[in-house]
Image: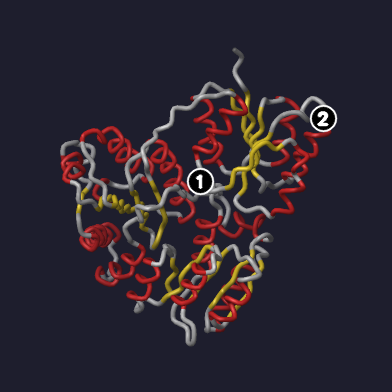
């Protein structure tokens, strides 16, 4: 039987690499295109059995690529899988005539992708059925990885791409990693997957083993790490504060900084919370690498489609956020209190919300509660001062994992936005 051929049109280097590896392992021939113009040319020349195309393209839009494809009698019948971070329903309806068989929203669920490829191409994938939830994010140049329910090889494989993307977005030169294994009682049967996780952490983060801390109550995890020479310097601890202090001691020794370990520990611990084991999906967020471009340059093509709210009673903060996003032509709506924001949020969807937690009248906690109660789903970034540790911890328990500490810096705002909104997995 002839090998099936697939063309992947996506501007994320990591996404293209991920799809290439999975399809190649499944026995398909894979070609990739780096933008819409490249994609149009390769559809004409290669005539693949399937096209996987991202909605957000430069040089030539997704609709233009698909229009060209439909005009070519040799290519018009090729089925299409469309991927997108966000897409308006009306814009999606415009693409119906272009032989789109599946629409997969990002963050991408690998099982949904496998199911679509199996149905459309007859490919077969070996899928680890183990339950697993992985989330990864960066706060204050520390990579926090939360793993719950179990260890899954597919999820760990995706994690390697996520780590690489986070390091690139934040330009982290000396990575430090905290892995939180939430309520998992692992045993020797989990050994191969645990080995894969530890190897992935070392190879992809490029962190020194002593700069990786694992938070776990499992004696098996501790004994496993100690028993392997490659992993013996990875410390397994049961106390997050101890893990943070250990990383900060190394930070001071390696970088020669005079920063207070106690203050840094108090600041950085804010983002650390055990994963909710009731969640069922994996959300790994990463984006196109652009090492030669600024963060604003990387985001400029998609900025015009972003709708952002800043909710803060400080006019200076409002203007800072507005000015920051003006560099990428995003739309910013400013609200001086929680009530006026909620009135608008009920009718206007926002891609991202910057929310101050200490406001008069209705504070940020009450806003979060109302958003949840009314089913309003927006990505929220908490704004806080260092002295408000308890307040930020409460926000993290409310499900908000990303925060920015005042005073704010434009580049930090854009990087956090890039991490959250440009989600492929």
Q: Residue at x 68, y 35 (%)?
A: 80
Helix, strand or loop status at disc 1: loop
Q: Residue pushed farthest top?
A: 1
In terms of sequence position, does the residue under pointer 1 or pointer 2 come before the other? 2
Outermost residue on the front side: it is: 373
**How far separated are the C-alphas under marks 1 and 2?**
32 Å
Residue nearest the observer in this picture, 209 or 4: 4
388 or 13, which lies in front?
388
* Residue 237 horizontal/vertical position (percent): 20, 53
Where is 160 relative to 267, above or below? above
Q: Residue at point 36% right, 71% down?
A: 394
* Number of numbered discs on residues: 2
Horizontal and vertical percent for residue 293? Answer: 58, 53
Coloration mode: secondary structure
- Mark 1 nearby-residue class (10 Å; few <14, some 14–19, many ≥20): many
Give the vertical position of 409 relative to 23 (above or below).
Answer: below
Residue 282: percent from left, percent from top: 44, 47
Residue 297 image point, x, y percent: 62, 57
Question: Quadrant location of residue 47?
Answer: top right
The residue shown at (64%, 37%) is: 81
**Looking at the image, which is closer to me, 182 or 250?**
182
Q: Quadrant of the N terminus?
A: top right
Residue 332 versus residue 49: which sits nearer the camera?
49
Which residue is tagged 1?
A: 425
Relative to 298, is 60 above or below?
A: above
Which numbered circle lies on residue 72? 2
Q: Is residue 388 left or right of residue 348?
A: left
Label 2 Cα neighbours within 10 Å, binned few <14 / some 14-19 / many ≥20: few
């Amino acid at each position: 039987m002839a090998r099936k051929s697939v063309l992947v049109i996506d501007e994320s280097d990591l996404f293209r690499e991920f799809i290439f590896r999975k399809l190649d392992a499944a026995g398909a021939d894979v070609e990739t295109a780096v933008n819409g113009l490249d994609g149009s040319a390769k559809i004409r020349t290669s005539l693949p059995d399937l096209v996987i195309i991202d909605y957000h393209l430069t040089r030539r839009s997704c609709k233009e690529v698909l229009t060209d494809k439909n005009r070519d009698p040799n290519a018009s019948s090729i089925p299409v899988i469309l991927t997108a971070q966000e897409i308006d329903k009306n814009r999606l309806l415009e693409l119906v005539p272009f032989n789109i068989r599946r629409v997969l929203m990002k963050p991408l669920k690998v099982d949904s992708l496998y199911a679509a490829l199996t149905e459309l191409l007859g490919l077969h994938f070996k899928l680890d059925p183990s339950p697993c939830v992985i989330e990864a994010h960066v706060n204050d140049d520390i990579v926090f990885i939360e793993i719950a329910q179990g260890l899954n090889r597919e999820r760990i494989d995706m994690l390697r791409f996520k780590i690489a993307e986070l390091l690139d977005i934040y330009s982290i030169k000396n990575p430090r990693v905290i892995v939180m294994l939430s309520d998992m009682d692992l045993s020797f049967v989990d050994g191969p997957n645990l080995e894969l996780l530890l190897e992935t952490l070392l190879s992809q983060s490029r962190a020194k083993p002593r700069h990786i801390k694992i938070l776990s109550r499992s004696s098996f995890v501790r004994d496993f790490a100690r028993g392997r020479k490659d992993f013996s310097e990875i410390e397994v601890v049961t106390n997050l504060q101890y893990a943070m202090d250990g990383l900060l001691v190394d930070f001071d020794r390696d970088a020669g900084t005079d920063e207070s370990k106690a203050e840094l520990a108090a600041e950085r611990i804010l983002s650390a919370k055990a994963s909710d084991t009731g969640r069922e999906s994996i959300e790994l967020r990463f984006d196109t690498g652009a090492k030669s471009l600024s963060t604003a340059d990387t985001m400029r093509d998609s900025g015009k489609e972003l709708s952002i709210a800043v909710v803060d009673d400080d006019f200076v903060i409002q203007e800072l956020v507005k000015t920051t996003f003006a560099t990428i032509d995003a739309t910013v709506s400013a609200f001086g209190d929680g009530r006026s924001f909620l009135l608008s949020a009920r009718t206007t969807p926002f891609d991202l919300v910057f929310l101050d937690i200490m406001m008069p009248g209705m504070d940020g906690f009450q806003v979060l509660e109302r958003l949840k109660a009314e089913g309003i789903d927006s990505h929220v970034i908490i704004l806080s001062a260092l002295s408000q540790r308890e307040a930020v911890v409460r926000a993290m328990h409310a499900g908000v994992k990303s925060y920015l500490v005042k005073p704010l810096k434009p580049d930090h705002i854009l990087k956090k936005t890039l991490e959250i909104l440009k989600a492929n997995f």
